[in-house]
Amino acid sequence: MSLLTVGTVAFDDIETPFGRAERIIGGAATYISLAASYFLSDIRLVSVIGDDFPQELLSDLEARGVNLDGLQRKPGEKSFFWAGKYREDLNIRDTLDTQLNVLANFNPVLPEHYKRSDFLMLGNLTPIVQMRVIEQMERRPQVIALDTMNFWMNTAMEGLRAVLKRVDLLIINDEEARQLSGVYSLVKAAEIIHQMGPKYLVIKKGEHGAFLFQGENIFYAPALPLAEVFDPTGAGDTFAGGFMGYLSKTGDLSFDNMKRAVIYGSAMASFCVERFGMERLMNLSQDEIGERVGRFVELVKFQVE
Amino acid sequence: MSLLTVGTVAFDDIETPFGRAERIIGGAATYISLAASYFLSDIRLVSVIGDDFPQELLSDLEARGVNLDGLQRKPGEKSFFWAGKYREDLNIRDTLDTQLNVLANFNPVLPEHYKRSDFLMLGNLTPIVQMRVIEQMERRPQVIALDTMNFWMNTAMEGLRAVLKRVDLLIINDEEARQLSGVYSLVKAAEIIHQMGPKYLVIKKGEHGAFLFQGENIFYAPALPLAEVFDPTGAGDTFAGGFMGYLSKTGDLSFDNMKRAVIYGSAMASFCVERFGMERLMNLSQDEIGERVGRFVELVKFQVE
């Protein structure tokens, strides 16, 4: 199975209550493909960078099986840059700076061999770019998943509605689900969002875990209670990468398997937050991932008579 | 097994985004004993009311097996009154009015036959009153559980520390756990709180569920995702009543059984929030409770290979 991922490849400045890091590697497509690489060897990446981006990280991704034929390099331009600061409640972050740079005129072009990918993960980007990727696919992927954010709901709702009709799975956070649906109850929000297109819906709640909805079916996975949450940046994309990586590896779209995908996604996200940026995601072992999944099993296990 | 519960019996004015109710019956001891009555027939209640309190509710409690010999009635005085308003995010409420009335000089006096109760649940009250109850016990209960709030941490921390040394189980919410421990991470907070006395700790997170900690053991139970949350008042006390009711009924203090108690407490709380005050808790059937517990089983169930 193959997974195509589309999203930003970027520099981040990050400040948390526990420290700060400048100009570290970030971006949705980076986190997604890195997390997915622990499940799958055929990952393709569509994004754009300037010539300021370090070759080292690109080599690391390629070494992990991520194909970069779809990564555009713009000479003389700068890569996307984001700076943010987290409050003590790590669920809240303030954006300090956003420099679109190469992203301002990003036109995704899929290499020929990307156009029949089995699974597609559309990271958070303007809905027009997400739609252009879908339109270039020669065969419909088994699952098209999409992430988005409040900003697009405020500025590009028409385009977002159009692309939502084309996707199977929407992965957003609780605040975004409430804004998109216009209701506060996440159960009601799920009903409304299902009607917009996605058959499957994941609502991420940060440190409070994640819901998976498919019609009447509801599954809830906690986040692991960690003594140290160092930096939440990329946790949502890492979740999405783990989820889609596991789904692509297994090719099983049953609700029971989707639940497992949520657990694997949550496990990958729990690693992500332990260090700045993607430091912790660079060298995980399958044993570490298996042990982490085992902690989720233990955390929620109970038996009623 | 017998359960002794101590706490307020009160009138509440409640406003939520979905409506308002005036002068309805509330109070920690009321919710706790009502929820526990679905598990246990021997429940004893210590509290105080004025002569403005309706006999009807007292008869209802007695009909459900709650002994009221420890309920003091103060002629010519008024019952405790609380008024609060919930924001759209039902996790936040503002207190509009608090009239202590009979509670101002409450001195709990245990009837003789209360003094050898098997389990003890100390609802949220000033730590001095909680301590006076413990001191009147002739035999140490199998479990002494305690609820408290930020107000006592701000105004009576010394008394609270003293009573915490005497209790086995502390049931508080996440905000209270953070204030009591002085740390943000709930995992670290649990370590610090264990050192203050309680071997067991439940941290309630409202719509996000609840943690149970016992040393290295951690269990997480979600809250049921409900389409309609009408009024959260009393949900925490109802949880405590269901938890202690189940624990008292089974008399089994293993961690596995404590987990079940968390699930039963969560199930009872999920009923509580569906209507104003304790309306929904007055006439539940064992079948309804069993069905609700089954929904918790389904909600978190997954199988990894």
Image (tube, coloured by chain):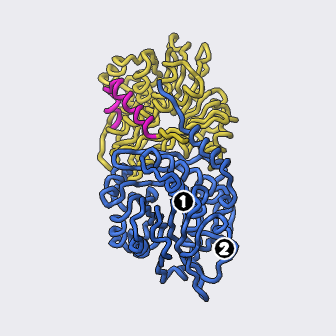
Chain colours: A blue, B yellow
Q: Which of marks 2 and 1 is in front?
A: 1
Would you identify the image quadrant in which residue A169 lies?
A: bottom left
Q: For numbered disc 1, what is the local secondary structure?
A: helix
Q: Where is residue B115 in the image (x, y as percent from the top left)?
A: 55, 14
Q: Which residue has dot 2 on it?
A: A23
Considering only order in the chain, which callout, 1 or 2, is on the residue closer to the N terminus?
2
Q: Can residue A86 be seen in this view?
A: no
| Label 1: few (<14), some (14–19) or many (≥20) C-alpha neighbours in 10 Å | many
Q: Are marks 2 and 1 on the same chain?
A: yes
Would you identify the image quadrant in which residue A37 lies?
A: bottom right
**Circle 2: residue type:** Arg
Residue located 62% across and 42% down the image: B180
Magenta stretch encompasses residue B280: yes
From the viewer's side, name the closer residue of A258 and B25: A258
What whole-number distance in Å separates the C-alpha atoms at marks 2 and 1?
22 Å
Instruction: Find residue A241 and name its label.
Output: 1
* Residue extent of the magenta highlight: B276-299
